[in-house]
Image (cartoon, coloured by chain):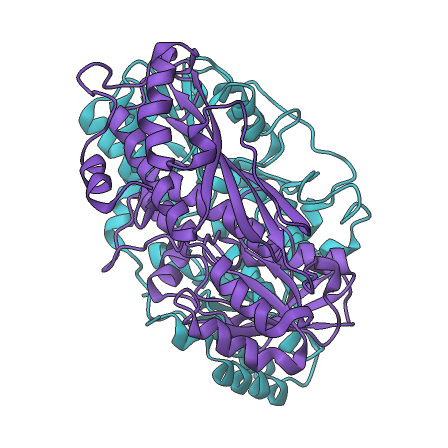
Chain colours: A cyan, B purple
Amino acid sequence: MKFVDEYRSEADVRKVADSIRALVTRPWTLMEICGGQTHTLIKYGLDRMLPELVTLVHGPGCPVCVTPLELIDRAVAIARRPEVTFASFGDMLRVPGSELDLLSVKARGGDVRMLYSPLDAVRLAQKLPERQVVFFAVGFETTAPAIAGALLEAERLDLPNFSVLVSHVLVPPAMEALLSSPACLVKGFLAAGHVCTVMGTHEYLPIAEKYRIPIVVTGFEPLDLMVGIRMTLAALEEGRHGVEIQYSRCVSPEGNLPAQKLLSEVFETCDRPWRGIGVIPKSGYALTPRFRRFDAAKRFDVETVTAEEPAVCIAGSILQGLAKPRDCAAFGRECRPERPLGAPMVSSEGACAAYFSYGRE
Amino acid sequence: MSDDLGEKLQALTCPVPVSDTPNILLGHGGGGRLSQMLVEKMFAASFDNAALSEMHDGAVLPVPAGRLAFSTDSFVVRPYFFPGGDIGSLAVHGTVNDLAMCGARPLALSSALILEEGLPMEDLWRITRSMAEAARNAGVSIVTGDTKVVDRGKGDGIFVNVSGVGLVPDGIEISPRRARPGDVILVSGAIAQHGIAIMALREGLEFGTTVETDSAPLHGMVAGLLEALGLDVHVLRDPTRGGVASVLNEIAKAAGIGVSITETAFPIAEEVRGACEILGLDPLYVANEGKLLAFVARERADQALALLRAHRFGAEAAIVGEVTDEHPGRVVLKSRVGGRRVVDLLTGDQLPRIC
């Protein structure tokens, strides 16, 4: 398959692995931001091809994992209403809320559907004028433009029966939150390639300066990750910091300007709680006044729903890179993919699920 | 069996006059005149065989001495027509294949239909013809059946159950527990075809070419393999739901052995790989309906491969792995880039990732 196989060549990956081994003289801890990167690392066994001096920790870049419990509970509360058709990306459906997940709501008679595109939800609302169609708008800067596009379309059509439950989060504030913690072990970042495809790299320059840390914008194929890791390690070994782009076939420093314009029309930043981490200032998106009539949380009055996260789950430490899934007492015991305590065990992108599915040998 | 001309004429039109009942009514499952008309004109005429034309409560079959294999499978696929097949042929192939995976030669099938009120009669006719043709091509008869109709909204058009019996020849012993270290694992062709054909249709994905289901009867290929290799064929499985990964896990656990596979060894069509990338799915977990996995004694592996490849449903057969005494109960994959990882069972369905 063109544009994919080139980045999955065993010979090339081995060559980079060898050059990494030749390069590293000291122990380094790197964080890959995005869940998609974690997935590739584990799926292809790349983590086992790195020298022992290099430790990879998994960042908070899995949208399923960082969505707080109370938002799941709000989604469940809306989805249970008889007049609602609740649409979501696939892997949000199994994330446990305090009592139920969305798949269980479906099993109990709720109209819950899996969609690939938010625009499909707009079409659904047109097709079902007697139903309230709600889309669970989850994700980072990557999925947000698609949601924004859907909202513009809903506005153009003046759809009274379409709304979104917004749970969008932003990467740079989360990186700052991690770096400002005294417990932070991370010495270099593999930044999320697709987030930067949309947003460009300008937000990362001040972070790299302030914390004197190398940030390499990295792609998602095995060779992308290995080269991104090598670039980060080379900067560390040479004492450099700053922002570099490995994923240059998609990412430009300015990013996707039309998408950014779309985002600024539809969203404004707000303080947002992250699962296991807490509230991070200016780390989420809320709808701008022009689009607030499409806010499902207001329309269905669920803004007061709150929830406590299970105490035994160390998702927070895992998402901050302070612990590995195997450090958790519940991992593989009380907490398994079929009965997850925390979100990182649910999504295939989640660090715990990745370890459980691919790592047990 | 009726002669060719009669059959061709009959195939042209639905024998239940569409002008009277263009759609299935509740009465078609009620046991009265409508039911009888459906059974006689549609099913008995299509499945045409001595046991069925008795119109008895069940079929009575002469059975030679030996071991009987018995299997059942229900089909609920949506949409019920898809590129390369439909729910009818799929159901016949499914049960024929389940019998073949026991090492059996299929003897007779049943057909139990649950129809939703309102199902277009023409659709039922197409599905019935397709079942009849699939059974005829597989050399097996549908000897008994049942039809029920449920209220509109309580079904998905049509659900099909096909059960079947088959004879296991002497000198054949197929069982997951017979997998042993050193066995070589073969797959009979390109994987993930059926699941992607269905999903591409559901999601409205279009490729340069249409991905068709691989639905096919495998008992002929199995018979050839067993005739030549006999007891050296240890395990046969068709990796339907849950795909290759799930079936290999089941075998590894049942036999207490380790399975080691190589990602790049699995044949897979380019458009199927592309669709898996787009949909965020791992082809190892995607359904097949016309493929088998065979565990054979190491010294017979090349012969087995040649036999599979010589069959029209096995042209792309390949050796994909082996059984080991390391990591018992687990399937370990050598990835495309040379890394290793465990391939585990999925919890439920594969859920596509967000980004």
Residue A317 spot, x, y in % from top left: 70, 49
Q: Is residue A86 above or below residue B71?
A: above
Nearest the camera: B63 or A294? Answer: B63
The reply, left or right, for residue B256 in relation to residue B315 is: right
The residue most toward the right is A329
- The image position of residue A189, as x and y in percent, is 55, 65
Q: Nearer the viewer, residue B117 or B337?
A: B117
Residue A192 in view of the camera: yes
Question: Can the viewer see residue A200 in this picture?
Answer: no
Residue drawn 54% across and 58% down?
A33
In the displayed structure image, the side of residue B270 where residue A31 appears, left or right: right
The spot of residue A274 in percent (x, y) is 58, 40
The residue lying at 40 percent from left, 26 percent from top is: B156
Q: How many marks?
A: 0
Q: Position of residue A22 (x, y in %)?
A: 61, 90
**Residue at the far bottom in the pictured view:** A22
Q: Nearer the viewer, residue B197 or A89?
A: B197
Q: Quadrant of the N terminus of chain B?
A: top left
Quadrant assignment, res A334: top right
**Who is closer to the viewer here, A86 or A157?**
A86
Q: Within the image, what quadrant is residue B226 found in?
A: bottom right
Above or below, B91 relative to A350: above
Residue at horizontal 45%, vertical 42%?
B141
Residue A93 versus residue A174 in the image, above or below: above
